[in-house]
Amino acid sequence: MKIAIGSDHNAFKMKEALKEYIETLGHEVIDYGCHSEDEIDYPGIAFDLATGVAEGKAERGILVCGTGIGMAIAANKVPGIRAAQCHDTYSAERAQLSNNAQIITIGAKVVGIETAKKVVEAYLNVTFQGGNSARKIDQIMDKEKEFHQAPVTSC
């Protein structure tokens, strides 16, 4: 699989370690940055990576920041994307099996690199099977389409 990866400066070292690990698992990695520990705002990285995944440039994505929260919020703003924050192997598996999440996010200040590797491996080792979960995802995506078609009003 082609796996997109991105981080902010808080998670640069973890991103680099995960990138190398994902390649040892036999996947191709597309690096959306950042490329150093110089301070950078995470939304741009999340938007770029999520757009790339939505456009089919990668099959799945991994985003890493301090907590994983901001990256998940930002990535979920891209239409069609389901990004799930994961800090353990069970949630990583369920992100794919139950939610068909194209992206997971991890907090570098929440879990260590070895745990993050296990989370990523768990996520990449499973494939969405549909079933009852497909109906629920369809409901989510239908609501997203509804919101994108609704006129924008100011407060």
Image (tube, rainbow, N blue to C red):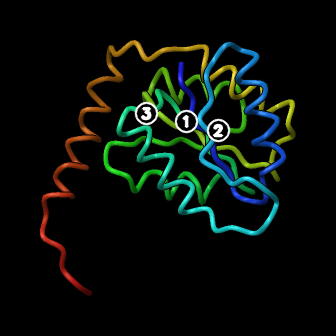
Closer to the chain start, of discs 1 and 2, is 1
Q: Residue at x 34, y 16 (%)?
A: 130
Q: Position of residue 97 (x, y in %)?
A: 48, 20
Left/right of residue 8 with respect to residue 102 in the rendered view: right
* Vertical relation: 16 (above or below) 44: above
The quadrant the C terminus occupies is bottom left
* Callout 1 secondary element: strand
Which residue is disc 2 drawn over? 86
Q: Residue at x 25, y 49 (%)?
A: 144
Task: Determine whether label 3 and label 2 are within 8 Å by CB.
Answer: no
The residues tagged by marks 3 and 1 sit, at their Cα atoms, a distance apart of 10 Å
Q: Amino acid at mark 3?
A: Lys
What numbered label is drawn on residue 103?
A: none
Neighbours of disc 2 within 10 Å: few (<14), some (14-19), many (20+): many
Q: Amino acid at mark 2?
A: Cys
Which residue is disc 3 drawn over? 57
The residues tagged by marks 3 and 2 sit, at their Cα atoms, a distance apart of 22 Å
* Vertical relation: 72 (above or below) 134: below
Q: Position of residue 28 (x, y in %)?
A: 61, 23
Q: Position of residue 142 (x, y in %)?
A: 20, 42
* Callout 2 secondary element: loop
* Callout 3 secondary element: loop
Q: Position of residue 9 (x, y in %)?
A: 76, 60
Please identify the quarter of the rendering in which residue 112 is found: top right
Closer to the chain start, of discs 3 and 2, is 3
Left/right of residue 133 with respect to residue 123 in the rendered view: left
Left/right of residue 64 with respect to residue 20 in the rendered view: left
Which residue is disc 1 drawn over? 61
| Near-viewer residue (129 or 64) | 64
Please identify the quarter of the rendering in which residue 52 is found: top left
Neighbours of disc 1 within 10 Å: few (<14), some (14-19), many (20+): many
The residues tagged by marks 1 and 2 sit, at their Cα atoms, a distance apart of 12 Å
